[in-house]
Image (tube, grey):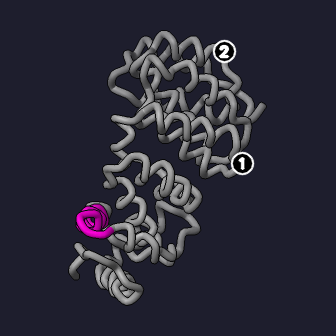
Amino acid sequence: MNLIRNNWSNDDYNEFINYLLSLEDIKYKVFTRNLIPGKNNIIGIRIPILKKIAKDISKGDYISFLQYNKDSYYEETLVYGFVIGYMKDVNLVVDDYLDRFVNKIDNWATCDLFVSNLHIVLKNRDLFFNYIVNCFETKENNWIFRFGYVMLLNYYILDDYLDYIFKICNFYQGDFYYVNMAIAWLISLCYIKYPDKTLCFIKDNKLNKFTLNKCISKICDSKRVSLEEKKMLKAYKKNKQYK
């Protein structure tokens, strides 16, 4: 299918959906369904293929393409997100499309794959940081919280943001598994880069048992952490399920 178009029509978009359906990989579909419980609108297309599709679309009139999105399929939503990631106009991304996509997120994979492809953040950290702060201050959607934490762990484990990271990790007091896992992942990566400062946080934090213990387990899984450190960290694990 020709994905580089000067203008997309509704008929073109329907052709695009049929093209996605033609790429179905049954084994990969089963694999993906097992990774994303409850997500049933999966075609079964590998991520590199979806990124290639999105990159081709982004070479043409991607704005007209995006207006027809219906989120009928998991992969359709991912292509939408990947196209946003290939945009070069940061103001267009932040002002017109970021909110639209973040509000589509309903599973960990859509969240994490979108964030990992949003490389425009690297040259515009301050602008995106303001958006992240707003996610935690004004939203109550757990998937938006997940998005905020995953953005931090991908692009903001730096001196200038470390204090905020620790503060916002203590901020979340819910029991949503995918948010707590993101926090554990984030703190474990902070420890790898800033062990002393992160150890101070681990010693004096407000995390529930699940999150803290997962964080320590992830740190201990790293080959960059010594056996002595791992033994020391395990002493900080909590014994009760939740505070």
- Please, what secondary structure does the residue beneath circle 2 have? loop
- Please, what secondary structure does the residue beneath circle 1 have? loop
Where 119 falls versus 209 (above or below)? below
Q: Nearer the viewer, residue 20 or 90?
A: 90
Amino acid beneath label 1: Glu
Which residue shows up at 55% across the image and 64% down it? 37
Which residue shows up at 56% across the image and 26% down it? 165
As drawn, the label of residue 140 is 1
Decide if residue 145 is in sight here.
Answer: yes
**First of labels 1, 2 by sequence position:** 1
Where 14 falls versus 166 (above or below)? below
Where 145 falls versus 165 (above or below)? below
Q: Position of residue 85 (x, y in %)?
A: 36, 53
User: How many tags in the picture?
Assistant: 2
Q: Position of residue 84 (x, y in %)?
A: 39, 57
**Dominant secondary structure of the residues highlighted in magenta in the image:** helix
Q: Report the mark closest to the observer, 1 or 2.
A: 1
As drawn, the label of residue 16 is none
Q: Quadrant of the N terminus?
A: bottom left
Decide if residue 21 is in sight here.
Answer: no
- The quarter of the picture where residue 48 lies is bottom left
Write down the region rendered in magenta.
49-61
Which residue shows up at 55% across the image and 40% down it? 131
Q: On the rendered structure, is 205 left or right of 2?
A: right
- CA distance for labels 1 and 2: 26 Å
Is residue 168 part of the magenta span, yes or no?
no
Q: Residues within 10 Å of mark 2 (few under 14, many from 20)?
A: few
Q: On the rendered structure, is 111 left or right of 87?
A: right
Q: Residues within 10 Å of mark 1 (few under 14, many from 20)?
A: few
- In contact (CB < 8 Å): disc 1 and disc 2: no
As drawn, the label of residue 204 is 2
Amino acid beneath label 2: Asp
